Image (cartoon, grey):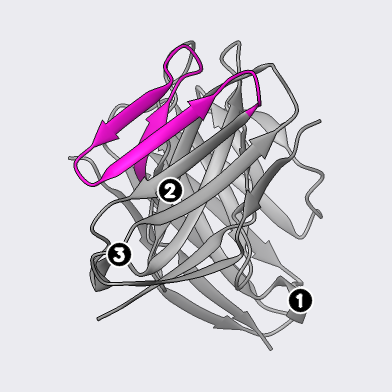
Amino acid sequence: DTEVTQTPKHLVMGMTNKKSLKCEQHMGHRAMYWYKQKAKKPPELMFVYSYEKLSINESVPSRFSPECPNSSLLNLHLHALQPEDSALYLCASSHTGLGSNEQFFGPGTRLTVL
Amino acid sequence: QQQVKQSPQSLIVQKGGISIINCAYENTAFDYFPWYQQFPGKGPALLIAIRPDVSEKKEGRFTISFNKSAKQFSLHIMDSQPGDSATYFCAAKLQGGSEKLVFGKGTKLTVNP
């Protein structure tokens, strides 16, 4: 299985809602990532988990809260978002350590904040 | 220092032609250079990647050329097909096991039939 799955595919939420994005992989990867991608822009790294511990937080606002419950799952909890947070949210995974470079991306969740 | 500069921003090629996308970097600590292909509404997918100890890598119609002294690398798509129409991102990764990828700004390729 060489796939990263993400749910839901689409999400529309109001600024006062709380929602969660989910990501799953069964490739034995111990690094998992959240990226945000705006239209016509490259993916922008938000968080990295390595061995279920948060290793990189790219100064993301606290209204985004990541969680890595186990080595296969990654969640992104959303609360009090702003319309400018509307974007494609991508999850990725990879092996860790030297020589382990390829990141596998999921299809993304298209988020719209009203 | 952490940037990867990609050009052109958009590219239109006729079917059967060669598509060339260029990237340049400053940080000599980068040691892995992948190219990702992204179709609308999909996540990026790794197309081909190279390390700086190799000057060229070919996989099918896709070739990466790497010039370490000039700190430049490029993607060549031979016999371009309409199905190759997508956005292409070059990227770079720091040596030492860093998990962070630095992406170029992307090139939107259109291959006309």
Q: Is residue B61 magenta?
A: yes
Q: Is residue B112 left or right of residue B22?
A: left
Residue A84 image label: 1
**Three-letter amino acid code at disc 2?**
Tyr
Q: Which residue is mark 3?
A: B84
Residue B92: image quadrant is top right
Residue A102: image quadrant is top left
> Which residue is at the front of the view, A92 or B17?
B17
Residue B36 image label: 2
> Which residue is at the front of the view, B3 or A100?
B3
Q: Which residues are magenta?
A: B46-71
Q: Which secondary structure lies at badge 1? A: helix
Q: Residues within 10 Å of mark 1 (few under 14, many from 20)?
A: few
> Which residue is at the front of the view, A111 or B10?
B10
The image shows residue A113 at horizontal and vertical percentages of 66, 82
> Which residue is at the front of the view, B68 or B33?
B68
